Amino acid sequence: MAESDETTTVIAAEAQIKGELIFQGAASILGKVDGKITAKGNLHVAERGTCKAQIDADDVEIDGTIEGDVTATQGVQLNATAQVRGDIVAEKMITAEGATIVGHINVGPGAGKDGAKAAAAKAVEVAAATRPAMTPGGHPAEPASIK
Amino acid sequence: MHCYYCGWRFEVSARAQSTSCPKCNRALMVSDIVVQKLSPVSSVQTCGRVVVKRSGRVIAKNVTAQLGVEVLGVMNADVASTGPVVIGPKAQWKGRCVAPTVVVNKGAQIAGYFEITGKAPSSSEGVESPTDAADASG
């Protein structure tokens, strides 16, 4: 992955985080993350890093373990020690011999952007489905019944 | 080598192009299969490797290769390999892939379910393993 001048946020090896992480730039995960990760730059999951998370980033480099879907608008690089259980959607992908993958892969021109849009649409759909319909008075609407 | 029908393990001459399984008597392809043009077939099976060249295009229901698969052209099939799978930089892949390792080069286009677990996939469904056969015969 190309090195850049911008600072990298590091989740240290001893750290264990539950919840949603949003990185405005590059990030490196050496610890454990459980939840959702969104990065507007490169995301690197180090060899001992473990993510049980849905990941959305520009570029993702994986040396560690990911349980969850990975969507990259640019590229995904799986190194030899990488273990991914989940779907991968990216524009480009490089996989080294020895990497473990169990899941659907959708890689090709336009796949990353379409995948990101699809993920966003799905998130909106899920949010709409789980949110109870509200009446003008602000009370949850009664479910419609057929008599 | 292993029979890709019954999983029986046996030895063949290094020069053999094809043989038959001593257990299930079915014909087996031993040599590598190199695809250089459009190849619309039902299934591709070999105890060797399947190589799809840049101009090659495999459109099949399933592909079974014991020593590995290399795709530089187009692969449109469900692939099971006990050897490594290499997907070239301009390759197009559509279908399942079950293999111990996979190498994907930058620029490849892929759509499908991948099961790359570091372990060789077991022989096809409903077949007895050599140990089972030995137990049954003994």
Image (spheres, helix red, strand yellow):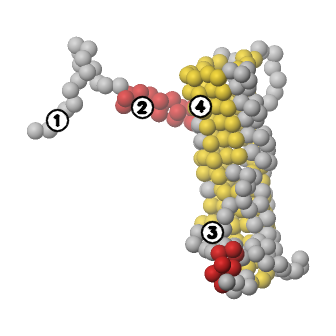
Answer yes or no: are tags 2 and 4 on the same subunit.
Answer: yes
- In 3D space, how far apart are the residues under numbered discs 3 and 1 (Cα atoms)? 51 Å
For residue B71, what is the image quadrant?
bottom right
Amino acid type, mark 1 = Ser
Q: Earlier in the sequence, mark 2 or mark 4?
A: 4
Dot 2 corresponds to which residue? Answer: A125
Same chain for the residues at labels 2 and 1, yes or no? yes
**Spatial separation of the CA atoms under disc 4 and disc 3:** 33 Å
The local secondary structure at tag 4 comes to strand
Q: Position of residue B21 (x, y in %)?
A: 73, 82
Distance from the alpha carbon under mark 4 to that under mark 1: 38 Å
Q: Which mark is residue A5?
A: none
Return the chain for callout 4: A
- In the image, which is nearer the foreground, mark 2 or mark 4? 4
Please provide percent x and percent y for residue A121. Answer: 47, 31
The reply to whether residue A53 is in sight is yes
What is the C-alpha distance between the residues marked 3 and 2? 40 Å
Q: Which residue is mark 3?
A: B124
- The residue carrying mark 4 is A53
User: Dot 4: within a 10 Å radius of its alpha carbon, few (fewer than 14), some, or many (20 or more) residues?
Assistant: many
| Between marks 4 and 1 in the image, the one whose residue lies nearer the viewer | 4
For badge 2, the amino acid type reads Glu
Name which of mark 4 and mark 1 comes first in the sequence.
4
Residue drawn at (64%, 31%) of the image: A51
Disc 3: CA contacts within 10 A as few (<14), some (14-19) or many (>=20):
some
Residue type pointed to by label 3 = Ser
